[in-house]
Image (cartoon, rainbow, N blue to C red):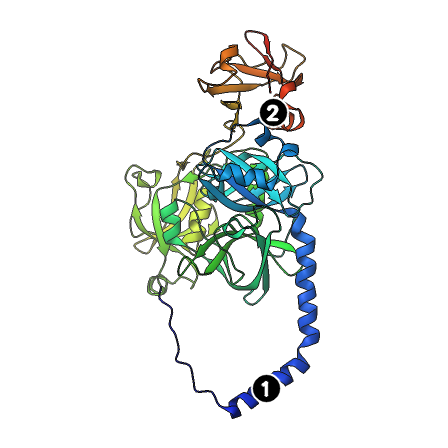
Amino acid sequence: MAWSWQPQRPFSLLAAARADDDAEVATRADPPDVADLQNRFVAVASKVAPSVVAISAAEAAADADASLRTEEMNPQKLSDWLDKTTRTVGTGFVIDSDGFILTNEHVIEDSQQYWVTTDQRKVYPAMVVAADPRADLAVLKIPATNLQTVHFSHDYSLHRGQWAMTLGNPYGLAIEGDLALSVGVISATERSLPRLATKENRLYSDLIQTTAQINPGNSGGPLFDLEGNVVGVNTAVILPQKQSNGIGFAIAISDQLLDEVRQLRAGKEIVYAYVGVSVTAATPRQRHELGLADDAGVHVDSVEDGSPAAAPDGLHEGDIILQLDGQAVGDSDRFVRMAGAASLDKPAHLRVLRGGKALEIAIRPIRRAVQFTVSQENQRLHWRGMVLGPAPANHSGAVPAASTDRPAGGILVIAIADDSPLKKQGINAGAVITAVAGRPVPSMLELQKVLNDVPAEQCTLQLAQPAAVVTLGK
């Protein structure tokens, strides 16, 4: 995008004098309000800073004991490690005082190891708890407690012109702490980015557009109102050129989003339904001819072969969909969200107009295929040349709940490098670790806590089958 430059007008003493007079009037009138507003910005930044973190993701794991221990990390050491690999930077914010952090999925995709740096310059190792590529959301966990959490706004009626603030990690500049503040206004609401959504296979709708500067690295961070409440999750930016700030977008906070965040916090996979149609909002002419309200109905542009909608008694190209499971449908974004949230256990009921005749159609949605996602069943952690994950309940080495006084589960060695010192001590892929340093590790989150709390030389491993204890050196 090219910038348009306007010619500079000739300068005159008269114009300068008038400008000075105007500036003097403005100076006399504005300072009290400006000072109050400035103080509000300062107060909000101070209030929310402990809840916001800079995220660093590495394409290759550092595979060092110190990289998993908060007490052995600092920003300088983290920078040194990141300089040796391909990195991604982003922002996140604390949603649970026990160390759960919300960010964008695109911040953590394609990476193997993660860290967060607080505004106070403390570095924590992080692990992905769960991620939803379609919604572009992910939850991380760090080994920390008693963290300050953000407050979500419960007033979803945002308006153009409202102040907006963001705190984050633009271009990775806050990797050592001191997250960067930017201030602007809400430019628009209910924005959609269909081209980006198609390219990324994500759902980018119901977005907030803002003039608060959102740059690469701000992704996943919070958009605040003037009270310090989170109104959005910074997600996308349109940059006119690489060196320029552009137009920023944030996912609007809603009841649906908060419900999904709770599911991700619990390590649950987010499942979407799939119907198999492309729709656009009905045109004014179509609505007028059919006697519909100005905000009613979506037009079926195409039906995918072999999809649920392509059944003999399904949808046809040219149909106008009025309702889905009793809820009115007025635009394509709403229909896509409603269809994605439909139950997989029962048919979805649609009210349709076909050739001016009203029809009731039942379609049983199927599970939408999405790119690889993360949940409590497939969390990963890299340590000492091993790729570790939760042991499936039906794995031969998993610990049954009734067979021992240890908790059920365990940690599965998914893969191990040939040069790993543990392989020389008899640990192979498929082994199940039940305890580390004498502490049970029934889950990946428990493992993360043990590795953070216990020095490496004390981390003896207890295996399920064959029963063995492996001692680690430094």
Query: On the image, numbered disc 2 is attached to which residue?
Result: 447
Above or below: residue 232 compared with residue 403: below
Q: Amino acid at mark 1?
A: Asp
Q: Among all residues in the image, which is located at the extreme bottom?
A: 14
* Distance (Cα) linking label 2 and label 1: 66 Å
Query: On the image, numbered disc 1 is attached to which residue?
Result: 20
Nearer to the camera, 391 or 120: 120
Element carrying mark 2: helix
Name the residue rendered at 53%, 36% in the picture.
114
Mark found first going from the N terminus, 2 or 1: 1
Nearer to the camera, 61 or 43: 61
Name the residue rendered at 54%, 88% in the picture.
16
Nearer to the camera, 391 or 451: 451
Q: Amino acid at mark 2?
A: Leu
Counting from the top left corner in percent of width and height, residue 1 is at: 35, 63
Image position of 355 (left or right of 163): left
